[in-house]
Each structure stands twice: as structure tokens, then as C-alpha cells.
Image (spheres, rainbow, N blue to C red):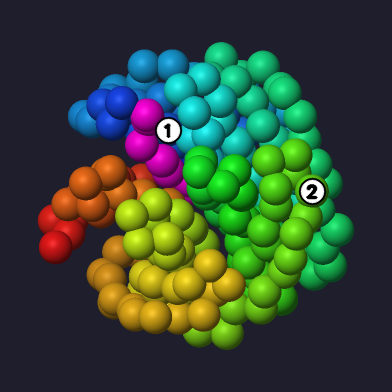
């Protein structure tokens, strides 16, 4: 029921999925069969990524306006930050993930330039790293077990495991058209991808 889904994360209880649509700037909570449990609009254009901060708080990125927005799970805005980025409007922020232990956000810029940008919990930028392993980057997930990042590429159709500076460690080819969201369950036995083009959620056994 979500048009052009572009970001994905599991809820804290792992019973549902948070998804964003870049077509209508709406955040959705879906059950594992795709039924809408909740939805709300975010003030801004072109939602592209979402991450769970805790049971009551989320963060999203807006591609065109280059903003990170922290909201509660009812859609009330808590804070936002503008990121100074050059390049084409439609090649901007694509994904966000969160390290709840160190309270650090990792945000990716799609291309021209491909970037990994790190922020503290107050959305103060800490560093920028250039990513050179794919044609673009379209989704990101922080792995709290191994302290690595899993970065998705739509155009290269691959997932790259990297260190926290974006240096590649391992990569996996995938056959999913236009994947734009990635997450794992906490046990890391399931990998989930969402496709903007097919509007489907793909579930993989992960070993």
C-alpha cells in the first residue's frame, strides 16, 4: 500500500516495519503482511530514509531539502538540521541509521558526491567520508553486533559491508530492482530489502 517506498527499519519490538514514501512525504508503520497500522506526514519534500532511535523516536532524511528530521512515532517534530551539500537536488540524502550505544547517526548522500556523513545525537556533523565502491548509495544499516555498516547500492545492485568510515570489507550482489531500504533483525538471521520500483519487501535468510 506504500507508493515508491524508499526507506526501511524494523520497529523496536521487531513486529512491524517503518517505511517512508518519497512520493507523498508520508511515514508508514506496516505489519509483516504489509497492512498499514499507522501513517503520518512529515513536513518536507522527498522522504528517502528512516531509522528507529528508540521506542518512541524516529529520524528521517529529506533528499531535496538536505535535512535530517527527528520525530516521535506520532509524527510530531522534535528537531531538524540542514546539511550543506552541493550537487543535483535528486542525488541527495538517501539513507540514515543510528548507533544507539554511542548515539551517532550515519547518513548517506546518493552521488555527486557519494558520502557517508556522521552526526552526534544533537545532529552536529562530526565527519564526512567519500564512498568509492559503487555507482551510487541508496540505503544504510548500522550493525550493532559487529559495529559495521551495511550500505546498499541501487545502480550497482549490491550490498557492501563497510567499517564505520565507509571502507569496504565485503560485498554481496543482489537481484532486486531499485532497492532503496535495508535492515536486519536483531539476531541477524533475516535481511530485509525494500524496492522503490516494485513496491515490494524482500526477505532473505542471512547466515
Residue 81: x percent and y percent?
80, 42
Residue 206: x percent and y percent?
17, 59
Tell me the SS state at disc 1. strand
Residue 152: x percent and y percent?
43, 65
Observer able to see residue 169: yes
Q: Which mark is residue 18?
A: 1
Q: Taken as a whole, is the magenta stretch helix, strand or loop?
A: strand
Residue 170 appears in which quarter of the rendering? bottom left
**In the displayed structure, would residue 53 be above or below residue 88?**
above
Please give the name of the residue rendered at 49% of the width and 28% of the height, measured from the top-left corner: 54
Residue range highlighted in magenta: 6-12
Q: Is residue 113 left or right of residue 185?
A: right
Q: Is residue 188 left or right of residue 182?
A: left
The crowd level at tag 2 (other Cα within 10 Å; few <14, some 14-19, many 20+) is few
**In the displayed structure, would residue 109 be above or below residue 30?**
below
Q: Quadrant of the C terminus?
A: bottom left
Q: Is residue 98 left or right of residue 29?
A: right
Tell me the SS state at disc 2. loop
Amino acid at each position: 500500500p506504500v507508493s515508491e517506498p524508499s526507506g526501511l527499519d524494523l520497529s523496536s519490538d521487531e513486529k512491524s516495519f517503518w517505511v517512508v514514501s518519497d512520493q507523498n512525504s508520508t511515514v508508514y508503520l506496516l505489519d509483516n503482511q504489509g497492512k498499514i497500522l499507522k501513517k503520518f506526514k512529515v513536513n518536507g519534500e522527498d522522504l528517502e530514509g528512516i531509522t528507529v532511535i528508540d521506542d518512541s523516536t524516529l529520524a528521517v532524511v529529506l533528499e531535496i531539502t538536505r535535512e535530517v528530521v527527528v520525530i516521535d512515532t506520532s509524527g510530531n517534530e522534535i528537531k531538524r538540521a540542514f546539511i550543506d551539500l552541493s550537487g543535483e537536488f535528486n542525488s541527495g540524502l538517501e539513507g540514515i541509521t543510528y548507533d544507539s550505544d554511542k548515539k551517532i547517526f550515519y547518513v548517506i548522500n546518493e552521488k555527486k558526491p557519494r558520502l557517508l556523513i556522521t552526526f552526534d545525537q544533537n545532529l552536529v556533523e562530526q565527519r564526512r567520508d567519500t564512498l568509492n565502491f559503487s555507482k551510487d548509495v541508496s540505503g544504510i544499516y548500522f550493525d550493532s553486533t559487529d559495529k559495521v555498516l551495511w550500505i546498499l547500492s541501487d545502480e550497482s545492485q549490491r550490498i557492501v559491508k563497510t567499517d564505520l568510515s565507509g571502507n569496504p570489507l565485503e560485498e554481496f550482489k543482489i537481484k532486486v530492482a531499485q532497492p532503496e531500504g535495508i535492515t536486519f533483525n536483531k539476531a541477524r538471521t533475516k535481511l530485509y530489502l525494500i524496492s522503490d520500483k516494485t513496491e515490494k519487501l524482500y526477505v532473505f535468510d542471512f547466515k
